[in-house]
Image (tube, rainbow, N blue to C red):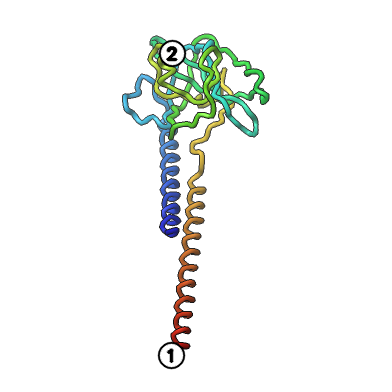
Amino acid sequence: MLLPLLLSLGFWQLDRAEEKRSLQLLFKQRQLKGPIEIEQVQPQQDLRYQPIKLRGHYINQKNLLLDNRIYQRRFGYEIITPLQLTGTDQIVLVNRGFLQGDISRRELPAIEAIEGEVELIGEVYVPQSEMMTLAADNASGWPRLIQVLDMDALAKEFGSALFPFSVRIQSPIAGSYEANWVVVNLQPEKHTGYAVQWFAMSATLIIIMVLANTNLWVLLKQRKSQQN
């Protein structure tokens, strides 16, 4: 019963490694092609790691602070500011990066307000899975402390056309903070290493089974000889 489980875990880790390699390849391809204008985005388009150009005005009075971020052993927040695109009513949530916070959580950090029209290049962030919520959001007041980006709820609150994904600032510009994100959260080599461990345990189990059955056969043969 244990052997099929160990083998399935090993093959699952190999599948995960291949998935991470595919994501890395997609990221490199998107970076080589360069950014596109947000107006070029098509419905149902795969936007993972897509560089994109934005132009608009920050809505500085409605900052979001994504809570429970740890970067280089420091506690802080990811600062997300709505950007209203020039000439439209569409809003894009721009992730400006990591800003260190008060570890005692008594005060929220001061967020730099950016006035006037800005132009930036960012990367569309498409979550790979649903994020786990550690606590309830502070649903009122600004700036607002949040645990996850609930795009549906925020779209209703802003009352405008909200771009379906957040955009992470790609290069340091005025108003950006530290980029604390990675392409994949675990390298393919790690998954391959885990697969090797599961397969090694499977091989060990097979050896134990063979030895146990061999010893049992020898014991039965000895008893039969004694009886004769």
Q: Earlier in the sequence, mark 2 or mark 1?
A: 2
Q: Residue at x 47, y 53 (%)?
A: 195
SS at circle 1: loop
For discs 2 and 1, the disc positioned in front in the rendered view? 1
Image coords of residue 52 (percent x, y): 43, 24
Residue 181 lies, with reference to residue 195, above or below; the image says: above
Image quarter for residue 30? top left
Instruction: Say whether residue 171 is left or right of residue 54.
Output: right
224 relative to 29, above or below:
below
For disc 1, the marked residue is: 228
Tell me which residue sits at (43%, 55%) in the image.
5
Judged from the image, the secondary structure of the residue bearing numbered disc 2 is helix
- Nearer to us in this view, 215 or 24: 215
> Which amino acid lies under the numbered mark 1 shown in the image of this protein?
Asn
Q: Residue 157 got which mark?
A: 2
Looking at the picture, tell me which residue is in the foreground, 49 or 156.
Answer: 156
The kind of residue tagged 2 is Glu
For the C terminus, the image quarter is: bottom left
Seen at 39% across and 24% down, the residue is: 36
Q: At which x and y percent is residue 196?
A: 49, 56
**Closer to us: 79 or 4:** 4
In 3D space, how far apart are the residues under numbered discs 2 and 1 (Cα atoms)?
89 Å
Residue 206 location in percent, x, y? 46, 66
Q: Quadrant of the N terminus?
A: bottom left
- Give the vertical position of 116 relative to 99 (above or below): above
Q: Residue furthest bottom?
A: 228
